[in-house]
Amino acid sequence: MPASHHAPRRSSSLALGVGLALLLVGDPLVVGRAQPGGPAPAGAPAGAPHEAAPALLSAPGVPAAVGHYGEAAVATDRELASLAAVQVLEGGGNAADAAAAALLALGVVNPSSSGFGGGGFALYYDNSPRARAAEAQMPGPRPDGPARLTFIDFRERAPLSATPDMYVDAPPGGTGPISSASQLGGLASGVPGEPAGVVELVTRFGRSSLGTVAAPAIRLATDGFEVDERLAEALGAFREQLLVDPTLRRWFGESGELRAGDRLVQPELAATLRTFARGGLASVYGGSIGRAIVRANRARGGRMTLDDLRAYRVALRTPVHARALGYTWVSAPPPSAGGVTMLQSLRMVGALRPVFRRDAVALQHALIESWKGPFLDRQRYFGDPDHVPVPLVELLDATRDNARAGRFHPFLALAPALYDLPIPQAHDEALQPDNSGTSHFCIVDAEGSVASVTTTVNLPFGARYSAGGFVLNDQMDDFARGVGERNAYGLVGGASNLPGPGRRPVSTMSPTIVFDPEGRPVLCVGASGGSRIVTATEQVALNVLLFGMDVGDAVAAPRVHHQADPNVFNTETVAPLPADQLAALLARGHQHEPIRNIAIVQAIHLEYTGEGLRPRLHAASDGRKGGRPAGI
């Protein structure tokens, strides 16, 4: 497929300024048949507010790879995964088929972030003729919010033997970095959900066979691919732990080293993917692949059984949504806290617009303050909605956001507790090292269907052992190891998020689609990066939709982050704020801690240029992780 190049513009607009180690700044590159030239400045749709950026920011950020397409677009954090998805689109598949192909390909070329042994969320907007016809025949009033949306929860589940105290006094899973019992070895792994998520996408929305969507990943695993600097650095950082596993040890070859430029061939994974392509769900959830998972898990001290695998089901959920700043924002429901956190923040920021209309520091200050209350809500109220009550109606009550806006001080950083608004008679109380253990991608197809998908093995290389050539997740670390204890991302665990049989842990993954006042999708966006996912996603979306930034500049721009506890805000060393802006935030009383980067964002902006015309698609992959978009 021919490639074209587009040098990302240096941002002269407002850039909203904590990170994944092992990720370096990449050179800009566009893959695919991009339309000539870049987009015009991204104006807001009719009826939506669009204003000049409230200040100029001299820091250029981390250049993103950007592509402009006329028919379909893919933005992932690995070029080969973007190309795999485009191959399926060119073969007649739709966004769901392409999403399934991207999921499988990412597990081959970026096993530190995601894969067959992990899980995730998919927010899917079905704009196929079939879906439009079915909607037109719906009797009665339309549901509140955009129609034709489905949220697929294929997050990992705890084994049926899991207990709330299973990590109390549990010995470490091994030696080396991030090696507690919930992070390394068999006790760290939940029942994988990604295979079920792939099948759900293909059978519910797709038009291709499972063999077709698996073919690019099988080829990559069979023929191998060239290891890039990011993967080589991650492999080096966790080398000693990975060498314990016989299959993962073979990655390093006879020399015991795997360097950038070396070719990684994965025959065991290729065989697994072929078996999956032929046998589907049955091969994993009770079949030969499932038996391999159980053997590997129990050999590393885990409790997983074939009954755990047989009991696994994806959950179809109603996404959360709210109207704010002239748009309708749709995102992830519980067990993710990310969507609710974003919607609460957006509505508070919307109430404070006069404060930051012409002042970049004032906006950064408002954002930092707007995240404090929602992250406290996460600690107290969030858990698996199939097992604990989550007061979603109360959490999404706009009066709470307005009340928090009323407590905001334009020149002072307030203690997070001042934004704490306990919900009366709530039933129950509801987790950052730098890492690369998650991937997000966006896809838009020729029919206008949109897939916003976040997938993960949690920490880098999951629990750092394998079955069938793929790493198993360490998603159990997203549970609370104990009430008040912090997970690897510094998030404090609450009672509602303790482990239990078949439960899904709370997440911050925030796959998001934003709609204009006419009900058209205008932005697909999401991120990887633990607790920083939601704040980075929100900032990129505001850069594009509120301030009219080119999507590449929006993804490249510096970011800030705050999660209430600890009471510090983070900036990026790879994309630092200008000194005067940082000084102005510190003068307001904010405590500051720089980290490498805040999160890795992929986005596609859909730009409508005329009535009835297909939108132009502007896709951006974050340079912080070196992804590349592709398209048609």
Image (cartoon, rainbow, N blue to C red):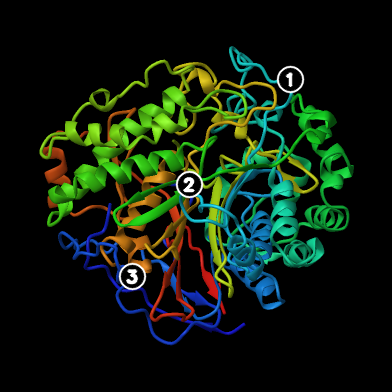
Q: Dot 3 lies on which element?
A: loop
Q: Specify the amino acid type for callout 2.
A: Ser
Tag in front: 2 or 1: 2
Q: Dot 2 lies on which element?
A: loop
Q: Nearer the viewer, residue 118 or 243?
A: 118
Q: Specify the amino acid type for callout 3.
A: Asp
The extreme front residue here reads: 140
Q: Nearer the viewer, residue 446 or 270?
A: 446
In the image, residue 465 lies at what x, y percent? 71, 38
Disc sitting over residue 161 in the figure: 1
> How many residues crowd around disc 1 within 10 Å: few (fewer than 14), some, or many (20 or more)?
some
Looking at the rendering, in which quadrant would you find the C terminus?
bottom right
Q: Which quadrant of the figure has residue 376?
A: top left
Mark nearer the N terminus (1 vs 3): 1
In the rendered structure, the answer to whether residue 294 lies left or right of residue 478 reads: right
Spatial CA distance of label 2 from label 1 is 29 Å
Disc sitting over residue 250 in the figure: none
Looking at the rendering, in which quadrant would you find the N terminus?
bottom right
Spatial CA distance of label 1 from label 3 is 49 Å
Q: Are marks 1 and 3 in contact (CB under 8 Å)?
A: no
Q: Residue at x 45, y 34 (%)?
A: 489
Q: Dot 1 lies on which element?
A: loop
The residue tagged 2 is 510
In the image, residue 332 lies at what x, y percent? 50, 44
In the image, residue 315 lies at what x, y percent? 66, 40
The residue tagged 3 is 550
Q: Are marks 2 and 3 in contact (CB under 8 Å)?
A: no
Q: Specify the amino acid type for callout 1.
A: Ser
In the image, residue 373 lies at what x, y percent? 31, 31
